[in-house]
Amino acid sequence: MTKDSAKIQPAVPKWLSDASNRIVSHMNADHSNSIVSTLNAQFGIKDTNATMANLELNGYYISSNGKLYFAKFTKKCNSVDEYREELIKHAQIYRDFELS
């Protein structure tokens, strides 16, 4: 990473960078329906192949049809446990947006 790109990219805290690969892999493998329903609820996009791409403190990016969409949380997370709570919240509130 260059100095210039560091200015563009917001700093991600160590706890999130350390957990990022594990969270993304787990969500894509075991909870893809939650990612799909979040994309549908927040953007009106129905894509059963959507995947979690990368994480930010206040949400995460969903990859769909070659584009990235930012799925926003209700708050900024300060720990892995808070991140998990926000993901669970999305699964619960967007359940009606799941695709069969």
Image (tube, rainbow, N blue to C red):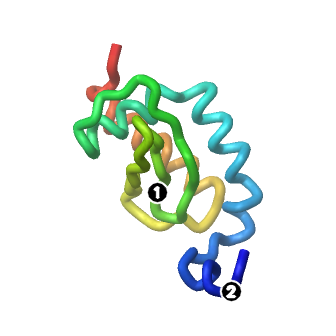
**Residue 25, which numbered label?**
none
Whole-percent x, y for residue 57 in the image: 53, 65
Whole-percent x, y for residue 33 in the image: 45, 26
Residue drawn 68% across the image and 52% down it: 20
**Residue highlighted by disc 1:** 59
User: The C terminus is located in which quarter?
Assistant: top left
User: The N terminus is located in which quarter?
Assistant: bottom right
Whole-percent x, y for residue 89 in the image: 42, 44
Nearer the observer, disc 2 or disc 1?
2
Q: Look at the picture and state if 82 lies above or below 12.
A: above
Query: Is 19 left or right of 49, judged from the image as shown?
Result: right
Q: Look at the picture and state if 71 lies above or below 63.
A: below
Q: Look at the picture and state if 70 lies above or below 62.
A: below
Q: Quadrant of residue 93?
A: top left
Q: Dot 1: what SS?
A: strand
Check contact, mark 2 vs mark 1: CB within 8 A. no
- Between 93 and 5, the one nearer to me in the picture: 5
Q: Residue furthest top?
A: 100
Residue drawn 56% across the image and 56% down it: 55
Q: Dot 2: what SS?
A: helix
Q: Amino acid at mark 1?
A: Gly
Residue drawn 33% across the image and 20% down it: 99
**Residue highlighted by disc 2:** 3
Work out how far the residue at label 2 is from the one at label 1, CA to CA, in angstroms: 25 Å
Instruction: Tell me which numbered mark, 2 or 1, is placed earlier along the sequence.
Output: 2
Residue drawn 71% across the image and 61% down it: 17
- Between 6 and 27, the one nearer to me in the picture: 6
Q: Residues within 10 Å of mark 2 (few under 14, many from 20)?
A: few
Q: How many marks?
A: 2
Q: Residues within 10 Å of mark 1 (few under 14, many from 20)?
A: some
Q: Amino acid at mark 2?
A: Lys
